Image: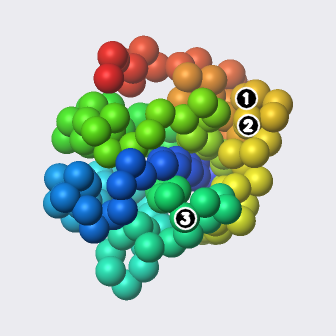
Amino acid sequence: MTSTAWHVAQVNIAILRAPIDSPQLADFVALLEPTNELADRSPGFVWRLQTEDGDATSIRAFSDDRIIVNMSVWGSLDDLGTFVYATGHLDVLRRRRAWFERMAESHLALWWVPAGTLPDVTESERRLARLRAHGASPHAFTLREPYPPPGADTPVTPDDRWFCPT
């Protein structure tokens, strides 16, 4: 579903298994730039959280220095799902257990933002907390439990092609 009035924001977090500059995370760090470049040139990409270094690994949020945060904005759920599950990003996703701790709680939340606006880390923390506390809703949802943009009268169903064993 594409909406010119709304874009979909996403946040996902991960708990590092080791310091970012450790040999254990060297492969992950080496994949950051090419994966970010892939996102930047993917259809529907709007924005991603980054510092002047080109990534967000130095941004601390969620009250834990071991947590890294990734945030981005996409033109549609389909654009985001295609990037995550139908590009080289999937290869990186499949290796996540080597670099990140398994999280007992939700680590990803999506929500709609008016086109032309950008979310901030504080908002992403609230959205993820809301999803954890109350489950999927129009306020915070997932690709598996999507919600349409505000004002849309057509329900959104998950797209099975986005999901595969990882």
Q: Where is residue 91 in the image (x, y as percent from the top left)?
A: 21, 36
- Earlier residue among tags 2 and 3: 3
Q: Do the residues labelled 3 and 1 touch (CB within 8 Å)?
A: no
Q: In which quarter of the image is residue 81?
A: top left
Mark 3: amino acid: Asp
Q: In this view, does 139 lie to the left or right of 120?
A: right
Residue at the image position 50 percent from the left and 58 percent from the top = 66
Which mark is drawn over residue 65? 3
Label 3 neighbour load within 10 Å: few <14, some 14-19, many 20+: few
Q: In which quarter of the image is residue 61?
A: bottom right
Residue at the image position 65 percent from the left and 59 percent from the top = 62
Which mark is drawn over residue 131? 2
- Earlier residue among tags 3 and 1: 3
Q: Are marks 2 and 1 in contact (CB under 8 Å)?
A: yes
Q: Nearer the viewer, residue 90 or 155?
A: 90
For the residues labelled 2 and 1, the Cα–Cα distance comes to 6 Å
**Which residue is denoted by mark 1 in the rendering?**
136
Q: Position of residue 162 (x, y in %)?
A: 38, 24
Q: What element carries label 3?
A: loop
Q: Where is residue 4 in the image (x, y as percent from the top left)?
A: 57, 52
Residue positioned most to the right: 134
**Dot in front, 3 or 1:** 3
